[in-house]
Image (cartoon, helix red, strand yellow):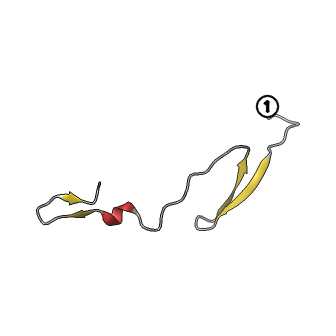
Amino acid sequence: GAPTGWRLPVREVRASVGAGFIYPICGDMRTMPGLGTNPAAHRIDLAANGEIVGLS
């Protein structure tokens, strides 16, 4: 039951070196950006009075 006689148009092939795999980009497909060099979690802390700071 698999279709025959068609091709998948691949416009680009990218490598995800850290994860160890490659993946195709087809048509108007978009990818999500990677994480920044300084994650927001590094700015979150607990004050002496127990209040969470750095979330705003």
Residue at the outermost top position: 1
Residue located at (56% from left, 52% from top): 32
Local SS, label 1: loop
User: Which is nearer the eye, 19 or 14?
Assistant: 14
Q: Position of residue 41 (x, y in %)?
A: 35, 62
Please state the total of marks drawn on the protein image.
1
Question: Where residue 47 sits: x, y (%)?
Answer: 17, 64
Q: Amino acid at mark 1?
A: Gly
In the displayed orientation, state which residue is furthest to the left: 49
Residue drawn at point x = 82 percent, y = 34 percent? 3
In percent of width and height, residue 5 lies at: 88, 36
Instruction: Name the quadrant of the C terminus.
Output: bottom left
The residue lying toward the viewer, choosing from 56 and 26, is 56
Q: Label 1 neighbourhood size at 10 Å, few (<14), some (14-19), many (20+)?
A: few
Q: Is residue 45 left or right of residue 1?
A: left
Instruction: Look at 86% across and 36% down and name the residue there.
Output: 4
Q: Position of residue 25 (x, y in %)?
A: 71, 51
Position of the N terminus by quadrant: top right
Report whether 28 appears left or right of 44: right
Q: Dot 1 corresponds to which residue?
A: 1
Looking at the image, is 2 positioned above or below residue 53? above
| Relative to 25, 42 lies left or right | left
- Placement of 50 over or under 25, stated as above or below: below
Residue at the extreme front: 56
